[in-house]
Image (tube, grey):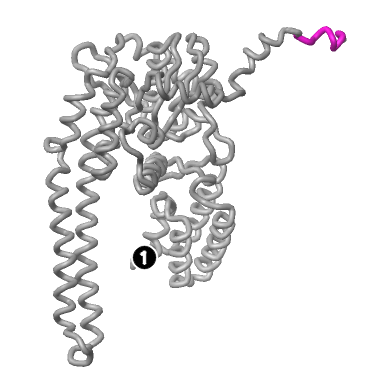
Amino acid sequence: MGNPKKTVSGNKNALLEEFRYYYSQDEKGLEEDWLVAPIAIDTNVLLHLHRYPVELRDRLKETLLSLGDRLHIPYHVCVEYHLLRDGVILEQRENLKKVRQKLKNGKTNIVREINSLNLKNRLSFDVIELNKRIEQTIDSEIQKLKQHDGNAHPDKDAMVKFVRRDLMSRVWAKPEKDFYEECVSSFEKRVKDKVKTPGDSDADEKSDEKVFWSGRDGSYYTKRAGDYIIWRQLLDYFAGTAFIWISDDVKEDWVRKVGNRIVGPQRNLLYEAAESQIPYFLIGDVTELMRRHSNSTMTPKEIEMSRQYRKNLALRSGYCDPEEHASPQEVQRGRQLLSELATAVANKEWNSAGSILTDFFELLPMWKMSHAGRDLTHGLTDGNPSLKDDLLGKVTALIWEFENWLTTKRLRLS
């Protein structure tokens, strides 16, 4: 066995270089990077232009324009934006329809409930006039929503024109076809070898079907390899240069977390960046970008709205960090409710089971969107007796998915 003393490096600088990714930049260097470093944006930043309410959307537009030549849009971000854009716009239209319908139903229900009290000529005010005011107020809000609906179409969306007119000049050149083919092949190998890779969190959910978008050369990619393709473009373009990556993607194939706090990029991404002679890169979210680069101070309301959209984006992708979306007390209470739910279903106490499930959804509302949650809701509320035969199995599935969520941070959405 060798003398331990002889194993000491003695080269402090070499060791500091080797372990530099375990240390954050100093505050001064961080602030300088936000002032001068090139800034590249993810697909979700562009799609936020179609999701955000007007005041937040205008702030994002202003921020992107203020970056000037510092703004960079990887080519594959542009590809994904054009493939996903219409779906996002039309989704907003569907959401508006749902809200309008809820308002219509609410108006009918409120008036019916008031009339059922038989209060006419028994109160010191006119109940009929009250009903009219309720109907007029709700009808007015419905009309306002219809005005938004008129713009919720790809051909009328003003943000489409903004992107084409003001941002397309910041898109990088298209890579060669061979680059895409090599990226898809490399991504699949990395997933197989369990190498932490942008996109590997989506590998099981997203399709490996080839997506063609350019008729000129037959270039294609697979949806699950999309993030990795963007990462490879970032490495190639910024070789030798520090940069900032802006995204509302919080999955841990991109970011490293301690508890529920994002502390920086995944370390293996920093290692790969070093191989491209990139001294350092930062990951920031859209809220941080707007806070630092818009011409006026963000209001607390705007900050909260922006952060909520980020959380919603994570939830939409099926990624929902328990430490961010639920306190330990809520997790404990959730387990208790699921145990009570199993007992109620086993005893065929359907009303009690429905009430417990409602309490569970109110405690942890993201579970309303889960596959198991919707499946169980359908079984409890549908009048078909045969659907109740396997309700205990559905409760078991919900409990399993809940515990799996606490470990993997992913929800299986229907």
Q: In the image, is residue 197 above or below residue 396?
A: above
Q: Going 52% across and 12% down the picture, which residue do you hit? A: 274
Which percent across, then down, holds residue 38?
A: 38, 18
Q: State which quadrant residue 53 falls in.
A: top left
Please say if 170 is above or below 364: above
**Between 12 and 148, the one nearer to me in the picture:** 12
| 405 left or right of 351 in image | right
Tag 1: residue type?
A: Thr
Is 177 on the left-hand or right-hand side of 159? right
| Residue 144: % across, % down | 15, 55
Residue, disc 1: 381
Q: Give residue 292's quadrant in the image.
A: top left
Q: Secondary structure at mark 1?
A: helix
Camera-side residue of 45 and 361: 45
The N terminus appears in which quarter of the rendering? top right
At 40% from the left edge and 43% from the top edge, which residue is drawn? Answer: 307
Query: Which class describes the residues within 10 Å of circle 1: few (<14), some (14-19), or many (20+)?
Result: few
